[in-house]
Every structure is written in C-alpha cells, then in structure tokens.
Image (cartoon, rainbow, N blue to C red):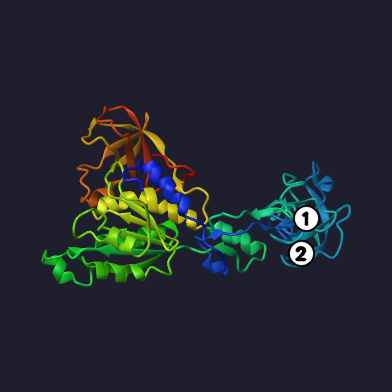
Amino acid sequence: MDHSLTARDAALRILAEARPQPALRIPLDDALGHVLAHDVTSPLNIPAHTNSAMDGYACRAEDVRGKAPLTLRVVEQIPAGRVPTRQIGRGECARIFTGAALPEGADGVIRQEDTDLGSEVVTILKDRDAGANFRRAGEDLPRGALALPAGTLLGPAELGVLASVAVGAPMVVRRPRVAILGSGDEIVDIDQPDEILSGRKIASSNTHTLVALVRQAGGEPVNLGIARDTAASMRGHLARAADCDLLVTTAGISVGEHDFVKPVLEEMGAEIRFWKLRMRPGAPVGFGVLRDIPWIGLPGNPVSTMVTFELFVRPAIRRMAGLALPFRRAVPVRVAEMITLGPKLQHFLRAVVSETPRGPEAKLTGPQGSGILTSMVKANALLVIPEGQHETPAGATVQAIPLHSPLHQPEPGF
C-alpha cells in the first residue's frame, strides 16, 4: 500500500477502478442527463421528404428566375401533413405551407410576401427566391447515418434527435449509486438546529454539499447518515452501502484514536490502496475496494472535502456514468499577485479567474484555510501550484481547473 502519492497518481488509480455501470432502458423524458449506452442510427431520412421552409408557392425556378412580375396557375393547395397529388408543370405552382412536402417538379418556394396571394392564379412580384426555401430529404440525418454515438451525454437537443428517430425508450448507462457517510461525535444533521445554533455541535455541511456534488456529477446520492466515533457505529453505517456502486466517506480518515474509517473497512475485508497524498488541502485521502465497491475517503474539513471531491470523486462518477472524458480541462492563467506557500506539497488554491485584455487572470479568494467554506462560494477555479514551488511571482503562468466549465479531458490537468 502506498502511503504518500501525488494527486495525479491517486486520480489515475481511482479511475482505473471506476467502471461504467450496466445499461438500462428508460422513458425518453426521464433520460435527461444520462449517458447513451449504444449507438443510435437513423432508420429514416430526416426530414423524410423534401419540404417547404416557409409559407408560399412551390414552383419551377426556370419559370420564375428573371421574369418577375409574372403569373402562375395554382393547381393545388398543400398544407403540412398532406401528400401532394400532382406534379408541377410549366407555368404552374402549388400553394404550400411550412413543412409540407414539395410536389414533384417544383424546385423552390416563393415566399408569400413576394406574391399577391392569389388562390387560382397568383402573381409573382419578385424572383429572389427562385430555387430556394426548401429542405431536402435527409438533410439533417440520412437513413442509416449515426444519429448519436454511445457515450453521448443526453441534453435537450439530444432528446429531440432521439424523438425524431422514434426512440421512445433509449438504452442509457445506469447512474451510479453513491453512498455518502459522515462521521464524528461533534457533528449533527440540520434536523437538530438547536444543537447547531447553540454552538454545542457542528452542522454536517459536508453531507449536503456531497449530495449536491454527486447529483451534479451524474450520480444518485444515497445518504448513509452520520456514524458516531465508535467502531460499532461505523460498521453498521458502512454495511448499508452494500447495494451501492461507490462509497464516499468524510472525516475519520486520519490516524487518531477516534478515526475508525480505515480500521473498520479493513476489518470488513476492504483492500486499502492508499490513504495519504502529497497535496494541500486534502492530504488525508484514502482509497480502497470493499467487496467490489470502490471507496474514497475524503478529509473532514469542508474545503478539503470539496477540493478532493472535484479531483477524485467527480471523475470517478463521470467514468462510472459512461463518460469518456472524466476530468475538467485545465487552462493556463496568469496570477495577479505574488503567492507564497509553506509546505513542500502540491497546492490547489481557490481563486477567481476573470478575462482581461492580456488573457485570463487569477486572484485568490482570500485566506486559504481548509475550514473557510465561503471561499468555495467565491471561487470559480482551483489554481494548481506544483510541489516545491514556494513562491509564484505576480505575472507567472500556472494551470487552473475551472470549476464550472463543461469542457473535459481524458487525463488529469494537475
């Protein structure tokens, strides 16, 4: 077992144990935010027929181009949903409406604003639309084309594409069930406000933060509650994670006499892979496997919990949910101030990155204590300061991990 790893090595080791979940079929309207499990090909042309892009008159371009004003005989009216019944010949047209199939012989639609709206004979006043204003069959998706590949994160547009090819119940990767367990005699949940407001106990903010983070990452949170500082309580709470896919604990991960997570996991048969990292905040991070369920142990300080979730848990959930790019894309930024650090560790500093005429610039949110949760409210990025870099002068370039960016990459950016 390794006792002190870099954050990057730890992230890659965790990811190697995070396997995509099985596929299941769910109703289309429930599939938002899920990941498509299989390729979907189009069984038809979309649109199915060459159709009008606007209300007007379908005609032959050669009859109109360069000849306006002119009159054409209206031989048919074609609303959307009706199949044309005849071909358009020389000097003829059809009154047509948006989405209606273009009749054979016609190769364009004159918008109604450029006509006198005649019903039997129409006068074409302008020829600017000769040969225009129609959508070809298969223009969006030809029959047999790949509509959406496996691994696609399903958003509103993707659900629309699935509906257009008549997929009412897509096969998606099942969202991982993520068990969340807090521990400590000093903490209580928000159902005990008097204990919290009196200062006798500390609110278990980590629990609610993690529930939200798991949901944002694409998992289904399962709150196991708060284990007391006894081996029996820890054992009982951990046993409830048996039907979950990933176990995340906070606090109880150090080596004090009241830290029971590691010894109880080992007693229950877990294989501990590592339990300390060369980073700040968040050095006491553990990882192992309990009965085929990956376990990630996070530190108890709220900032440390959020930072280590971003670096290790979020990528694991994304991989388990079927996404090929688990890590947020790191970007270079210029620091606006001198940064001086103490311990020879890799640091992840809360910062605000903003655009300037010289490119993205980063300023720290203020004090970087691991208990200052409001710093995570202010931050929109984590600055990655390499191990051993005690001083980073103003104007230097460092890597930043944007906390709200939708752009992702296959490898850690730290």
- What residue is at 36 percent from the left and 71 percent from the top? 240
- Viewer-side residue, 316 vs 402: 316
- Cα–Cα span, label 2 and label 1: 9 Å
- Viewer-side residue, 277 vs 218: 277
- Viewer-side residue, 390 vs 15: 15
Q: Position of residue 338 (x, y in %)?
A: 24, 30
Q: Secondary structure at mark 2?
A: strand
One can see residue 293 in this view: yes
Q: Amino acid at mark 2?
A: Ile
Label annotation for residue 78: 2
Is the residue marked by circle 1 packed among few (<14), some (14-19), or many (20+) residues within 10 Å?
many
Q: Measured along the vertical axis of the image, is residue 45 above or below residue 82?
A: above
Q: Position of residue 152 (x, y in %)?
A: 56, 54
Q: Position of residue 52 (x, y in %)?
A: 72, 56
Q: Secondary structure at mark 1?
A: strand
Give the mark count.
2
Please give the residue where the numbered disc 1 appears in the rendered image.
Answer: 58
Q: Quadrant of residue 56?
A: bottom right
One can see residue 405 in this view: no
Q: Quadrant of the C terminus?
A: top left
Q: Quadrant of residue 267?
A: bottom left
Q: Amino acid at mark 1?
A: Ala
Label annotation for residue 378: none
- Viewer-side residue, 163 vs 96: 163
Find out whether the residues at labels 2 and 1 contact each other: C-beta distance under 8 Å: yes
Left or right of 239? Residue 226 is left
- What residue is at 21 percent from the left and 50 percent from the top? 372
